Image: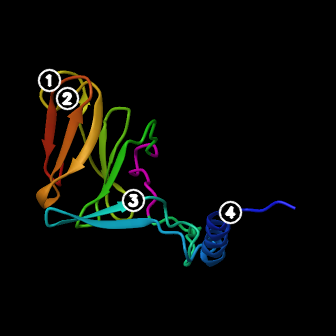
Amino acid sequence: MLRYPRRDSAALALLALAAACTPADDETTIQTTTRRDSAGVTVVENHAPRWGRSPRWTVDSVPLFAPSSADDAPAPIFTRLLNVYRLADGTVVTLDGSAPFVRAFDASGRPRWSAVARGDGPGELRRPAVLSRIRGDSLVVDDGASPRALLLAPDG
């Protein structure tokens, strides 16, 4: 018969007790967000998405927005959609990988305006990379091939 010293037995008993009291790893006990204070500023860190928790995400079968063509133009075709923004008036502005790079559609999907051709002249960019929305629904298009950017009003 093997004999364990008393301290090993006590440590083993504490370990068994701690394991028995540990909560199970189910969705109710997984902590995905940590809050901490850093010099008076609250910092929130997200460690995992909250997908799969109720309510579950679904995709509606009816699109919220579908671009259409003008009466005399072919339907818009996007080659590489980079950014999409919905402005305050419902206008949807897109940045695509082919010229005209920036296209705007009204809330029903009809074309409103297009801007930014390929080139090095005024109102042109070589390779637009990012479309950003700034104050007042103005837009900034940054060129990925040069240190240039264009500022667009909400009406193009």
**Number of residues whose C-alpha sits closer than 10 Å to that of mark 1, classed few (under 14), some (14–19) or many (20 or more):** few
Circle 2 — which element? strand
Counting from the top left corner in percent of width and height, residue 16 is at 67, 71
Question: What's the mark number on residue 109?
Answer: 3
**Number of residues whose C-alpha sits closer than 10 Å to that of mark 4, classed few (under 14), some (14–19) or many (20 or more):** few
Instruction: Nearest to the eye among marks 4 and 2: give it.
Output: 4
Circle 3 — which element? loop
Disc 2 marks which residue? Answer: 124
- The residues tagged by marks 4 and 2 sit, at their Cα atoms, a distance apart of 82 Å
- The residues tagged by marks 3 and 2 sit, at their Cα atoms, a distance apart of 25 Å
Q: Amino acid at mark 1?
A: Gly
Earlier in the chain: of badge 3 and badge 2, it is 3
Earlier in the chain: of badge 4 and badge 2, it is 4
Disc 4 marks which residue? Answer: 5
Residue at 28% in and 33% down: 128
Please tell me whether residue 96 is drawn above or below residue 139 in the rendered image. above
Disc 1 marks which residue? Answer: 121
Give whichever of 141, 123 is nearer the camera. Answer: 141
- The residues tagged by marks 1 and 3 sit, at their Cα atoms, a distance apart of 30 Å
Asked if residue 77 is among those painted magenta in the image, a careful observer would answer no
Counting from the top left corner in percent of width and height, residue 39 is at 14, 62
Instruction: Nearest to the eye among marks 3 and 2: give it.
Output: 2
- The residues tagged by marks 4 and 1 sit, at their Cα atoms, a distance apart of 85 Å
Do the residues bearing badges 2 and 1 touch, measured as CB atoms within 8 Å?
yes
Give whichever of 41, 55 is nearer the camera. Answer: 41
Task: Judge from the rendering whether residue 155 lies leftward or rightward of residue 62; answer left or right.
Answer: left
Question: Which residues lie in the magenta part?
Answer: 65-75
Q: Amino acid at mark 3?
A: Gly
Do the residues bearing badges 3 and 2 touch, measured as CB atoms within 8 Å?
no
Give whichever of 145, 16 is nearer the camera. Answer: 16
- The residues tagged by marks 2 and 1 sit, at their Cα atoms, a distance apart of 5 Å
Q: Amino acid at mark 2?
A: Glu
